[in-house]
Image (cartoon, grey):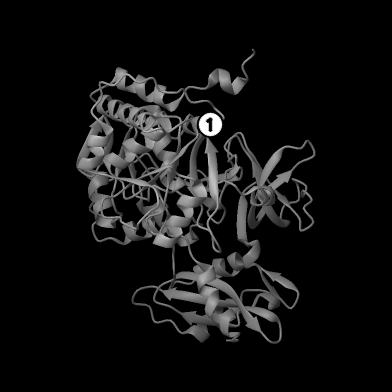
Amino acid sequence: MTLTEEEAGFVPLQDIIAAHAQAHPDAIAIRVEDAVLDWRSFHARISAVARALVRAGIAPGDRVALLGAPSLDYVECFFGIVAARACAVPLPVSASAETLQALLADSGAKLLFADPDIDAGFALQVIPFGPGYARWRGEGGDETALPRAEPGDPFNIIYSSGTTGLPKGIVHLHGMRQRQAARKGFFPPQARTLLSTPMYSNTTIVPMLGTLAAGGTCIFMRKFDAGRFLALAQAQRATHTMLVPVQYQRILAHPAFDGSDLSALELSQSTGAPMDLALKHAILQRWPGRFLEVYGLTEGGVSCFLDARQHPDKLATVGQPGHGGEVFLIDEAGRRLPADAAGATGEVVGRSPFMMAGYHGRPEATEQIRWRDEEGRICHRSGDIGRFDAAGFLTLLDRIKDVIISGGHNIYAADLEAVLARHADVQEAAVIGVPSSQWGETPLALVVPRQGASLDAATLRDWVNAQVGKTQRLAGVELRAELPRSALGKLSKKELRSPYWQHKETP
């Protein structure tokens, strides 16, 4: 039988970890705060977890869930599940007990590893991290043969933060994760990557896999704190990190920032939400090393990178399509817009070597995100509206569902938010559509003033409206102490809009 190109080049992650354990057994692979695992111990423990899972009846493809904050136990269980050729299901610790029960049922998980203080009466076997887990895992000596993973095996199911209903389970395969981890230019063998986002997020999983596949060290924070991040980055001489925009904002605002030595940082990445222009400027002025903004989907396919120091004149964009992929626009009828149609707006669509297999048990939802080109190749629809400039840099304008249609005109929140961001007294702003008896809906700006600023809402509205087209004018400005965000720092416009549409009030 002839092997496909992917099958011929595929090396299971367990084998990659074993090679690092043999090459530099005493080097640190995992650090969670002050607790560490060297490569020898890391490999031994994940092998013990995998063998314990096999003994417990976990077969290839079975789903095993995890729930908790970062810990050595959590990390070795994640990789032990993968080494057993099972499918890891990291669950969001912020979800309600009811939602967690639903996600466990949806995934079909046969076993759950969880922090010992989590007790929600789950209807499956729960192994709490700690002494009981250590006894269950065993300390090695068992030579039970482990099944060898294949490229088409499910690696993980990640539940996206759905805005309505039960989140969809995104299925990634072993082959895709290996290709992703093996990408060049991100994590060298000497990387010391500091991670502070939740374990159930792709924001954590992607750099974790890339760092460990290269043979570097992953340093985890159990909970993000700006001061603790600075202390860890300095003490551990962190070379790489992946953060969401609100974390950069809090770190830069911390009183210890200017006195912290972050000179070891080589590459800092931002993802999870768009970053405003003022924050990008602040990073270029004050944050050391290379800064890379990453725009993409957990589902994969659509992926752009902005190397900010290389392109300081493109900070209002999210960069250019990633190597090996393509990103383009389609119109409302689903037709691909010409590549040379600079300035045209449309839905952002793309394909790459790093795409999900589909949504778990949701064929209709899987089909809805897919768009096929003339050759029948699968691409992913982002749900974002954007436009390319003549140099191929992408500017995001809005989510399709968030586009404000006022008097028949499409108004993109990003255009108005960009104007607001230029005001010296505006720290953060979000523009939403609210009901209007005259226009159907109309744009309203919700603004967080800079600390110490004296900002008048009506004056700010007039200042913005003097700079935009007649159809774009703000109906009003409201000042807020803060804007609502998810656990990953993503702005919740649904939560902002809800009070206005629920009561049908016009500002």
Give the residue pinned by disc 1. 153
Tell whether 160 sits left or right of 145.
right
Q: Quadrant of the C terminus?
A: bottom right
Q: Position of residue 127 (x, y in %)?
A: 31, 44
Q: Position of residue 162 (x, y in %)?
A: 53, 59
> Toward which corner of the image does residue 466 lie, by quadrant?
bottom right
Label 1: how many residues lie within 10 Å, few (<14), some (14-19) or many (20+)? some
- Does residue 281 appear in the picture of this structure? no
- Does residue 65 appear in the picture of this structure? yes
Which residue is painted at 25% across and 27% down in the image? 41
Total marks placed: 1
- Amino acid type of the residue tagged 1 in the rendering: Asp
- Work out whether residue 410 or residue 130 is closer to the camera in this orientation and state it: 130
Q: Position of residue 388 (x, y in %)?
A: 67, 51
Above or below, 484 relative to 154: below
Tell whether 435 sits left or right of 181.
right
- Work out whether residue 50 or residue 490 is closer to the camera in this orientation and state it: 50
Which residue is painted at 23% across and 37% down in the image? 134
Above or below, 172 relative to 343: above
Q: Quadrant of the N terminus?
A: top right
> Toward which corner of the image does residue 20 lie, by quadrant?
top left
Q: Position of residue 33 (x, y in %)?
A: 23, 45
Label 1: element kind:
loop
